Image: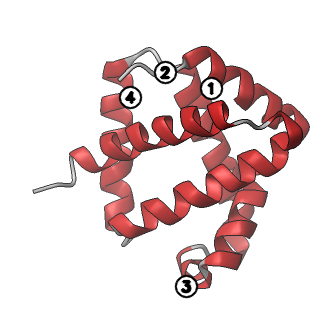
Amino acid sequence: MALNVRLLRDSFDLVATTNPKITTRFYEILFERYPQTQAMFPVGNRAKQAEMLTGALVAVMDHLEDAPWLTSTLGALGEKHLSYGVTREMYDWVGACLLTALAETAGSKWSAELNAAWTEAYGAIVSLMLARTAS
């Protein structure tokens, strides 16, 4: 699978510039749609969690062309999330909420092409995160 690296990076730069708190908005959407996930994120730790997600997204954007880094890092992240009780279904919830936050932030600049690129990228991320947890 060949991700559209330029499109992903350009659109991430756009949304990060438009709303540096995009991950905070992501969590708002996640908790609105799936209130049962709130228990996984202690209230006092949510700002730190949003910062960690931002850092993870930036790191993935920086390493989109580095398959060994992606495989190793995202595999380890998947193992960690399994230990937190994250289920396969929850990855779908997160993906839908992330795309909503991205689209909302990009506004009129969001397109079918961007949606497809991010859907494909998120699918690749999930595959790598789950690869080491399947037994």
Q: Which mark is residue 36?
A: 3
Q: Secondary structure at mark 3?
A: helix
Residues tagged 4 and 2 counted as in contact (Cβ below 8 A)? yes
Horizontal side of residue 48 vs 37, given as left or right: right
Secondary structure, mark 2, is loop
Alpha carbon separation for disc pair 2 and 1: 9 Å
Instruction: Look at the image and tell me whether residue 58 can be seen.
Output: yes
C-alpha distance separating marks 4 and 2: 7 Å
Q: Nearer the viewer, mark 4 or mark 1?
A: 1
- Residue at numbered disc 1: 8
Residue that numbered label 2 is attached to = 64
Q: Which mark is residue 70?
A: 4
Circles 1 and 3: CB atoms closer than 8 Å: no
Q: Residue at x 41, y 16 (%)?
A: 66
- Residue 85, quarter of picture: bottom left
| Residue name at image x 73 percent, y 28 percent | 11
Counting residues from the start of the chain, the first of labels 4 and 2 encountered is: 2
Question: Which of these two is toward me, 129 or 101?
Answer: 101
Cβ–Cβ below 8 Å for labels 2 and 1?
yes
Please state if 71 lies on the left or on the right of 91 as rendered. left
The CA span between labels 4 and 1 is: 15 Å
Which residue type carries mark 2?
Leu
Left or right of 63, for residue 81: left
Q: Which residue: 32% across, 63% down?
A: 82
Q: Residues within 10 Å of mark 1 (few under 14, many from 20)?
A: some
Name which residue type carries label 1: Leu
| Amino acid type shown at disc 4 | Leu
